Amino acid sequence: MSAASCRRHLVIFARRPQVGVGKRRLARGAGDLTAWRFQRLMLARLLRRLAPDPRWTTWLAVTPDRAAGDLRWMPGAGRARVRAMPQGPGDLGRRMARPMATLPPGPVVLVGSDIPDLGPAQVAAAFAGLDGGDAVLGPADDGGYWLVGLGARARKRPPFKGVRWSGPHALRDTIANLDRAGLGWRTLETLSDVDAAGDLAPAHFR
């Protein structure tokens, strides 16, 4: 592992895929089995694309917490190159703030596990944006965001308190927190995540 990768941390937030657990909006429209299959395929694809990259260390922040202790459930060849950590208790903001506080020094980029178009180019662009910068955000087309990255100053003041998650205000609220803290930020390209059955496409299952 290179010295550069030890100073850059990519954290993939994911739930252990289980039938009937997680992705409830998707399951309501597409069924529990389809939602589970999508979770497994997306996580395997992300690990295959991102975990082997030597430019960063890849962490998997997983829920439920006990799933971090034994990764045999994890799909894909990237398993051997990922380090697991529990998400821990609290709302999404508290869980997202935890890696910012606990990981070794260096920029931290956090992504979800349901963004089909996410790959190494987007992660590399995020780390480039943190080279001397405080924060980067990857907007999603529903008003949320698919990526957040924080540099050294912003890691001390994660901008997640009071954010209205799972709605059209998450990006706006996070930017407002950054502005109030006097932290600079920039945005990346807009990507789509998969939350509901209407977001699915045949390509997601190949």
Image: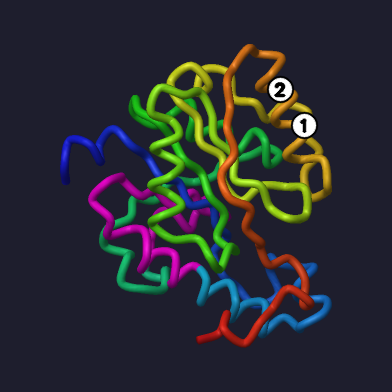
First to last magenta residue range: 43-71
Q: Is 95 on the left-hand or right-hand side of 78?
A: right
In this figure, what is the number of numbered marks? Answer: 2
Q: Is 195 on the left-hand or right-hand side of 154?
A: right
Q: Is 123 on the left-hand or right-hand side of 105?
A: right
> Residue 90 location in percent, x, y?
68, 37
Question: Foreground residue, 83 or 106?
Answer: 106
What kind of residue is marked 2? Asn
Q: CA distance from mark 1 to mark 2?
A: 6 Å
Disc 1: CA contacts within 10 A as few (<14), some (14-19) or many (>=20) = some
> Residue 58 location in percent, x, y?
35, 49
Q: Which mark is residue 177?
A: 2
**Relative height, residue 2 to residue 201 (above, below):** above
User: Would residue 47 be counted in the magenta stretch?
Assistant: yes
Question: Foreground residue, 181 or 100?
Answer: 181
* Numbered disc 1: secondary structure: helix
Q: Are marks 1 and 2 in contact (CB under 8 Å)?
A: yes
Q: Residue at x 72, y 80 (%)?
A: 32
* Numbered disc 2: secondary structure: helix
Question: Foreground residue, 31 or 126?
Answer: 126
Residue beneath disc 1: 173
Residue 77 occupies quadrant: bottom left
